[in-house]
Image (tube, rainbow, N blue to C red):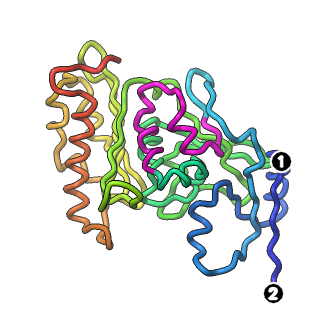
């Protein structure tokens, strides 16, 4: 029987050296990996990243924000962030129970690449990039190019995700997040949406809207975003959402909902999200 190995390096370079030398499963929180095993034993070499303190934390960088790969959802929920990050903070409170939020990490959520990953829609709405490191160097990819499909990413075997990067241009405006499930808490999404708008002189100057759990990969609604730009930032904004704006989605039938229900639900919660950003009788400052 092949013997599995376990390593817990204290520094990033040591972790990268191990990845360059063999096959390892990088883990930080392990909140998806271990439950997924069920009663089966671990048959992979485990690279525990929990001792690498440099991978955890949120910092300003070039006017934007750098979120370390080991940053937990509790870290994000408690962080003092601009209103553009409200959707991400709301999503952080929806990732499982408090125990999962205390342990689960941003990078783990993205690398797991579940179609229902709560962190993906708000990070897409923030035009996020991921930073990938190996002994060969560092590369950056848009989040939309990193997640390739259900449980598939562009991460190479010798790479680690070291950070999520939000550019300064996306750290503007105000955002919100709505998740629809079969119950209020501790549930996998039927549909979810993150919406961010920037308002200048009462007019929408930019919009970013993404829908999750309704396609293999969370999807930005580019046609709707373009249609909202130049519109008055008033209570009519949510009523501008039409079925044609969701044509890029490809929901499936499963035990949680039918594809048809998901389409109708997505239409409704996108409208509600925009309504939350521009309440009746009020305008949102840029």
**Percent x, y for residue 49?**
74, 52
Which residue corresponds to the image point at 75% horizontal and 57% vertical from the top-left?
Answer: 48
Q: Label 2: which residue?
A: 1
Taking the image as shown, residue 168 lies to the left or right of residue 56, namely: left
Question: Which image quarter is the N terminus in?
Answer: bottom right
Stretch in magenta: 67-94
Which residue corresponds to the image point at 25% horizontal and 33% vertical from the top-left?
Answer: 276
Taking the image as shown, residue 138 lies to the left or right of residue 243, namely: right
Residue at the farthest bottom position: 1
Classify 10 Å Cα crowding around label 2: few (below 14), some (14-19), many (20 and above): few
166 falls in the magenta region: no
Residue 60 vs 136, above or below: the answer is: above
Helix, strand or loop under label 2: loop
Question: Which image quarter is the C terminus in?
Answer: top left
What whole-number distance in Å separates the C-alpha atoms at marks 2 and 1? 29 Å
Classify 10 Å Cα crowding around label 1: few (below 14), some (14-19), many (20 and above): some
User: Which residue is more in the foreground, 226 or 190?
Assistant: 190
Marking on residue 10: 1
């Amino acid at each position: 029987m092949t013997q599995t190995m376990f390593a817990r390096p204290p520094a990033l370079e040591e972790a990268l050296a191990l990845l360059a030398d063999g096959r390892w499963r990088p883990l930080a929180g392990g909140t998806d990996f271990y439950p997924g095993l069920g009663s089966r034993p671990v048959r992979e070499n485990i690279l525990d990243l929990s001792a690498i303190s440099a991978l955890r934390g949120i910092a300003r960088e070039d006017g934007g924000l750098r979120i370390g790969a080991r940053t937990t959802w509790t870290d994000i929920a408690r962080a003092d962030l601009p209103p553009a990050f409200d959707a991400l903070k709301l999503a952080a409170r929806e990732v499982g129970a408090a125990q999962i939020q205390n342990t689960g990490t941003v990078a783990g959520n993205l690398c797991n690449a579940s179609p229902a990953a709560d962190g993906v829609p708000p990070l897409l709405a923030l035009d996020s990039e991921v930073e990938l490191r190996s002994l060969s160097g560092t590369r950056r990819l848009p989040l939309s190019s990193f997640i390739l499909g259900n449980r598939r990413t562009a991460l190479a075997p010798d790479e680690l995700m070291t950070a999520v990067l939000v550019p300064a241009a996306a750290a503007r405006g105000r955002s919100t997040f709505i998740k629809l499930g079969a119950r209020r808490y501790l549930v996998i999404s039927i549909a979810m949406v993150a919406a961010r708008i920037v308002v200048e002189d009462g007019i929408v100057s930019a919009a970013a809207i993404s829908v999750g759990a309704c396609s293999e990969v969370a999807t930005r609604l580019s046609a709707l975003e373009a249609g909202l730009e130049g519109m008055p930032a008033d209570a009519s904004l949510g009523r501008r959402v039409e079925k044609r704006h969701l044509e890029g989605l490809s929901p499936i039938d499963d035990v949680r909902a039918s594809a048809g229900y998901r389409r109708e639900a997505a239409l409704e919660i996108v409208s509600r999200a925009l309504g939350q950003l521009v309440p009746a009788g009020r305008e949102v400052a840029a």
